[in-house]
Image (cartoon, rainbow, N blue to C red):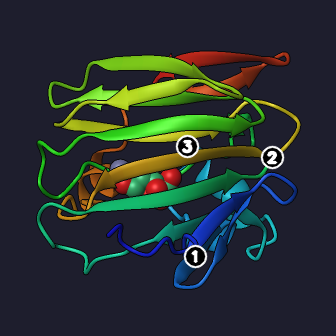
Amino acid sequence: MNAAITNPLIYFSSETMQLKGSGIVYTEKTIGQLAGIFHDESARAVMNQDTVVYTVQAYLPVKPGTDGGLFLGTTTIYPGAVHDEYFMTHGHFHEIRNRGEFYWGIQGEGLLLMMAADRSIQTEHIHTGSIHYVPGNTAHRVANTGNDQLVFNACWPSDAGHDYKEISTNGFSFRLVNNNGLPQLIKNT
Ligand code: S6P
Ligand code: ZN
């Protein structure tokens, strides 16, 4: 006999572009929580500190740290900038460095920045339907270069963990700025 068919616990709503269902963990990052991440710290400091830069919904079906499981997350980055630098995620390496991840674009437009351990950078355009493989040992961050919300999904191993410290301390080697309406990569100084 076949196992009973059950409804999935969660689903992705194409109306709200958000995950729905039970057990979804929601976090948001505001301008106030992103001190030291953008180049122009004085511009960031005078902005409304409650402005939401991005939100993350995560479905964690197993305990973080479990080996062999998978996590799923939806990130929504609002349009905006700190001075000329596009709103973006904090960015991280995985704590277990060799763990990779998939990203895929749902709505809006942006750029995925991937930085290897030698600080070399690769970028990929995120848009509806785009699919991105983030290899292990690679820091990853996404910037919203459009005028609408940028929504993308991610799937990563449940034992990957997140190392935010390396990026808080040394940043990425390149930044993404709005140069007369066009995204431009400039060396981080
Ligand atoms: C998790 C995955 C994403 C990010 C999210 C926010 O491994 O890469 O779900 O957590 O895009 O970025 P950050 O850098 O604040 O975690
Ligand atoms: Zn990640």
Name the residue tied to disc 2: 149
Q: Quadrant of the N terminus?
A: bottom left
The reply to whether callout 3 and callout 1 are in contact (CB within 8 Å) is no
Name the residue tied to disc 3: 39
Residue 43, position as x, y percentages in the image? 72, 53
State which mark lies toward you, 3 or 1: 1
| Residue 37 visible in this rendered orientation of the protein | no
State which mark lies toward you, 3 or 2: 2
Residue 89, position as x, y percentages in the image? 54, 51
Q: Which mark is residue 173?
A: none
Q: Which amino acid lies under the numbered mark 2 shown in the image of this protein? A: Gln
Observer-nearest of 56 and 176: 56
Sequence-earlier tag: 3 or 1: 1
Q: Measuring 36% from the left and 43% from the top, which residue is drawn there? A: 171
Residue 34, position as x, y percentages in the image? 55, 64
Sequence-earlier tag: 1 or 2: 1
Observer-nearest of 142 and 48: 142
Name the residue tied to disc 1: 27
